[in-house]
Amino acid sequence: MEQVAEHIYSTEEREQLFNTEFLPTIRSLYNFAYRLTLDEDDARDLVQDTYLRALRFIDSFKKGTNAKAWLFRILKNGFINEYRKKRREPVKVDYQEVEEFYNSEDSGKTITPDLRVDMLRNLVGDEISGALNALDVEFKTVIILCDLEGFKYEEIAGILDIPVGTVRSRLHRARQLLKVKLAEYAREMGYKTA
Amino acid sequence: MNTAEHQESCNCREILQLVLDGQATAEQTETFREHLKQCPDCCSRYEVDAAVVEMLKKRCCGGPEPHDLMAQVKAQLNLRG
C-alpha cells in the first residue's frame, strides 16, 4: 500500500466509511472483477477479498481522497498478486515491448484499423463486450478505468502504479487493438473494408 | 496535407485522445475543433473513436452485482446498516 500518514479510525468511523463510501462502489468493483477474471465466482471472491483488504488497511486510507480509486487499486493488486499467481497464468504480452513499438515513429501507420462509424452501428453489445474481454489484461484494464469508470489519467496512473504517459500510450494502443477486433467482427458480418 | 505528412507534422493524435477523454484544456479543445474542420483524416478518426467509447459505455458497464453479494460482504466484515 502507498505510504501515507495513517489515521486510526474508530469502529463508528470505519462503519461510516464502508457504508457511505466503500460499499456504494460494489457494482463497479464487481464489473471490474468480472472483466478481469471472466468468471462470476472468481469475480465475487475478488470483490470480497478487496473489501477484506480495505478493512485491514483502512488506516492508510486518507479521508477525503478518492475512495473508489483506492478500492480499484486494491482490487487490481489482489488480482495480480493472488488470483494470477494461483493460476500460474503467465503474462501473455510483453507490453513494455508493445509500448516501445507504439512509441516508435512508424507505429501509427501499421496498426490503424479500417473501421467506420456505420460499421460500428451494426455491431451488437455482445461483440463489443467480447472484443473488450479478448484484450490482454493490461489493455482491457485501462479501457475499463477510463471509458467505463471515467477515471482521469492521473487517477489511473495511481491505480496501476505507472506514469501518466504510459497510461496514455497504453490507452491509445488498447483502443487500436479493440478497433482491430471490431473491424474483424464487422468484416465477418459482410462489411467490406478498403 | 496528405496522410503521411499529416502524421509526421502534428501531434493531433495526442490531442484527439485528450479531447475524447475530456481531459484537454479549453484552448486545446478549441484548436482541435478548428483543425477538424479542415482535416478529414482526424475528423473520421475522431468520429470512430467517439463511437467506440460511446458503445463501450452503453454495452459494457455490466448489470447489477449478484443480489446476495452485498449481504455477503457485510456479513464478512461484521457491518450493520
Image (cartoon, coloured by chain):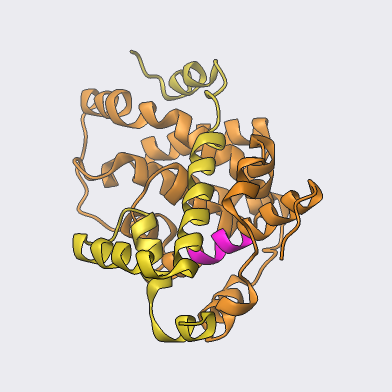
Chain colours: A orange, B yellow
Residue at image point 59% right, 71% down: A95
Residue at image point 44% right, 34% down: A51
Residue at image point 39% right, 31% down: A25
Q: Is residue A111 visible?
A: yes
In this picture, residue A107 sits left or right of residue A147: right
Asked where in the image residue B9 lies, by quadrant, the reply is bottom left
In the rendered image, the quadrant that contains the C terminus of chain A is: bottom right
Relative depth, front residue between A53 and B70: B70
Residue B54 percent location from the top left of the image = 48, 43
Asked where in the image residue B55 lies, by quadrant, the reply is top right
Query: What type of secondary structure mainly makes up the magenta span?
Result: helix
Residue A177 percent location from the top left of the image = 63, 61
Residue A110 percent location from the top left of the image = 64, 77
In this picture, residue A9 sits left or right of residue A86: left
Relative depth, front residue between A72 and A4: A72
Q: Is residue A142 visible?
A: no
Residue B30 percent location from the top left of the image = 24, 62
Q: Which residues are magenta?
A: A172-177
In this picture, residue A60 sits left or right of residue B64: left
* Residue A43 is covered by the magenta coloring: no
In the rendered image, the quadrant that contains the N terminus of chain A is: bottom left
Q: Is residue B26 above or below residue A126?
A: below
